[in-house]
Amino acid sequence: MTRDALIAALARPAPEVSRPDSLKPAAVLLAVQDGRLWLTKRASGLRHHPGQIALPGGKQDPIDADATACALREAEEEVGLPHAAVTVLGTLPVQDTVTGFAITPVLAEITGPFTPFAQAGEVEEVFAVPLAHVLDPSRYAPQSRLWSGRRRTYWTAPWGPYYIWGATADILRGLALRMR
């Protein structure tokens, strides 16, 4: 997948969405390098989303100038990705979650040196998945389960031993559909 194709996907218009003011702003980084996308496995001892596969990112703090600054800060903290090693390509449409966040996905290319590490206590593992896998819409399947008394449907895109699902799969599927 070429850098130009990713940039073209970002340029495609997205439908306008009305969202409640109660959602907390957050951002994640879709860090692409040499045909791979970097993901994390969250630490199993975390209170929220333990052991889940996620994109580096988190809640936007007052120190963050915007969603991009948040995603870059979080990626540096969680996986050791220096700001200087990243070229931001753009953002995808904001993704609302059932857990009360409005997540801005930031797409970036890793253009400098990067040796990943897992932030102790927050990240159990840092790994790369082939970009071709997450950009193939046929890799995504809907699943559902009861959550807070309601049936919730979500996307999954398993890869090897990793079960990519929920907001992470939804964000990646959105990019895959934009690539078509």
Image (cartoon, rainbow, N blue to C red):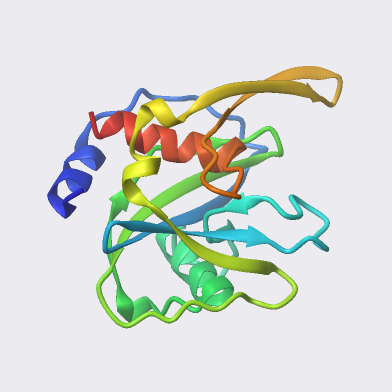
Nearest the eye: 15 or 107: 107
Give x and y (percent) for residue 98.
68, 32
Give x and y (percent) for residue 58.
60, 58
- Name the image quarter holding the C terminus: top left
Image quadrant in which you'd find residue 74 = bottom right
Q: Residue lying furthest top in this view?
A: 151
Answer above or below: position of 54 versus 112: above
The residue drawn where x is 37% and y is 77% is: 83
Answer above or below: position of 108 versus 114: above
The residue drawn where x is 48% and y is 77% is: 116
Image label count: 0
The residue drawn where x is 50% and y is 69% is: 75
**In the displayed structure image, the side of residue 112 where residue 30 appears, left or right:** right
Answer above or below: position of 77 versus 54: below
**In the displayed structure image, the side of residue 34 where residue 4 appears, left or right:** left
The residue drawn where x is 61% and y is 30% is: 20
Give x and y (percent) for residue 155.
56, 28
Q: Residue lying furthest right in this view?
A: 149
Q: Residue lying furthest front in this view?
A: 160
Image quadrant in which you'd find residue 99 = top right
Image quadrant in which you'd find residue 174 = top left
